[in-house]
Amino acid sequence: MKISRTISGSKRNASSYGQEIARSKEMLENVLKAKNEQQIEYILSVAKIKAKGEDLTVVKLKKLLDKAMLKEEVVLNKMQLVNLYLNSFMPEQAKRFIINIKDTKGG
């Protein structure tokens, strides 16, 4: 019997970790280009957690989403991809990312 579905989804649509990270990075870039202040503040909040060397937990992310008032399903799906990319950062990478975003925003 051939397995066509796994816990993580359909085997046909399976992608590698590298492909998921690339897709996540692209989503982050798109969110930053859109210049939505709520979404950018959320991203910075997540990056600050990573900069402290802490792990991203569901509880922390839920609190940040609630604080940023991001509730639409489309936005939540975007942020899920963004979280994946930010979670790949080491603390020093997260610190540089925060500095770059603040420089780009002009403050």
Image: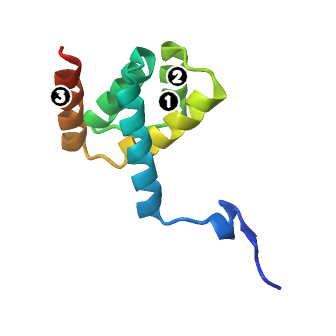
Give the distance between the C-alpha atoms of the residues marked 3 and 1, in whole angstroms: 21 Å
Mark closest to the chain's N terminus, 3 or 2: 2
Mark closest to the chain's N terminus, 3 or 1: 1
Query: Crowding near pointer 1: few (<14 within 10 Å), some, many (20+)?
Result: some
At label 3, the amino acid type is Ile
In the picture provided, is 87 more to the left or to the right than 75? Answer: left
Q: Which mark is residue 99?
A: 3
Q: Residue at x 16, y 23 (%)?
A: 103
Location of residue 40 in the rendering, given as x and y in whole percent from the top left corner: 38, 23
Query: Crowding near pointer 2: few (<14 within 10 Å), some, many (20+)?
Result: many
68 up-or-down from 54: above or below: above
Q: Quick check: marks 1 and 2 in contact, CB under 8 Å? A: yes
The residue singled out by tag 2 in the image is: 65
Q: Look at the image and tell me in which quarter the C terminus lies.
A: top left
Q: Which mark is residue 61?
A: 1
Location of residue 82 in the rendering, given as x and y in whole percent from the top left corner: 44, 39
Q: Which mark is residue 46?
A: none
**In-front residue for pair 32/5:** 32
Q: Residue at x 37, y 21 (%)?
A: 35
